[in-house]
Image (cartoon, rainbow, N blue to C red):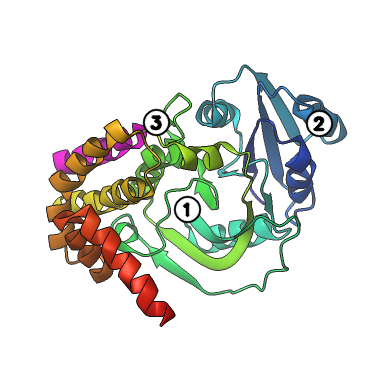
Amino acid sequence: MNKLVSVIVPVYKVEKYLHRCIDSVLSQSYSNWELILVDDGSPDNCPAICDEYANRDERITVIHKENEGQAEARNVALDIARGDYVMFLDSDDYLHSDTLDDIYGLALEENADMVQFSFIRGSHENFPVIKKDESYQVYNNQSIFYSSVQKVILCGKLYRTELWNGVRMPKGKFNYEDDATTWKLYYKSERILYVNTPYYYYYDNPQSTMANQRRVTSLAFIKAYTERISFFKNKGDKLLTDLSKWRFCLPLMLVYMRGNVNKSDLPVLLKHFRENVGNAIRCSKVPLLHRFLFFVFRISPSVYRAFFVFMGRAHNL
């Protein structure tokens, strides 16, 4: 018998897109699923939309709660999820109709703890029809950390529910729950598959919390990475410690260059970058391009910026 798959959708101020999201689950060719909609105190018509769908299909459960942020909405759903596998779907995104059938089938066939799949990303209402690619790569809880396919984002993955035992997202509206959580699930997974087919349609919603995060970034993500580094350091795993420093230096550099933090926070970013970048540069598993960029940025952020301005002009010659 096919096992139950739990699909978790936090819902907040997305009434324009919510029907499309829920309908994409209803249209799945794989039918043994439960959909958990968590109304996170949405002030629009979303609560009524959720209840309407639940009244029509017994596989849909609705939780109404006060607004505490996406992380806690997901946690609440995880606490009641009954599936052997679980997947997260953001309420302004949607799934290809064969997502659960194909991804669950592959997880079962390969005895995978996690199956990660690709995205189509855009701001248009209707995405192009995907072309399936049946190829996939296999990783373990070491090789995934130096692969090019590791993604911080929690969506776009099917998890064996057991992975979530003892793991929950940090409470609060900090928008760094993915950074603080995904690596733990990678580390607990003995077998991870990456599928090249983009089954997940990621809508760039200008009103989403993630879009707002790009305008002003909290430094809360620093805590997520320092905890990760400390975890592997205490384990005595130098490789995963150094690879964690690599992954930490990337957002530090990116946030600094974008300037979407308070000016008083810029020295904090530089401090953490300089404390960790040496190990990242010396680690042979870190891509050579990243090591070069880290080297230039460590010399001077101004030199780094000038280098990219020059390269952009040279490209246009």
Say the numbered circle drawn on residue 49. Answer: 2
Return the residue found at the far top: 66
Residue 195: image location, x then y, percent: 52, 66
Q: Amino acid at mark 2?
A: Ile
- Packing grade of label 3 (10 A; few <14, some 14-19, many >=20) is few
Q: Is residue 157 magenta?
A: no
Q: Check contact, mark 1 vs mark 2: CB within 8 A.
A: no
Q: Is residue 148 above or below residue 315?
A: above
Q: Is residue 314 left or right of residue 210?
A: left
**Disc 3 secondary structure class:** loop
**Residue 192 percent coordinates (x, y):** 42, 58
| Distance between mark 1 and mark 3 Cα atoms | 17 Å
Identity, as a three-letter code, of the amino acid under mark 1? Met
Residue 297 in the figure: left or right of residue 222: left
The residue that mark 1 highlights is 114
Q: Residue at image x 20%, y 46%?
A: 273
Q: Is residue 222 magenta?
A: yes
Inter-mark Cα distance, 1 to 2: 31 Å
Closer to the camera in the image, 291 or 181: 291
- Look at the numbered disc 1 and give the secondary structure of its residue: strand
Q: Nearer the viewer, residue 180 or 164?
A: 180
Front residue of this view, candidates 286 and 305: 305
Exactly how many numbered labels are in the figure?
Answer: 3
User: Picture coordinates of residue 90 (x, y %)?
Assistant: 62, 42
Dot 1 alpha-carbon crowd within 10 angstroms: few under 14, some 14 to 19, many 20 or more: many
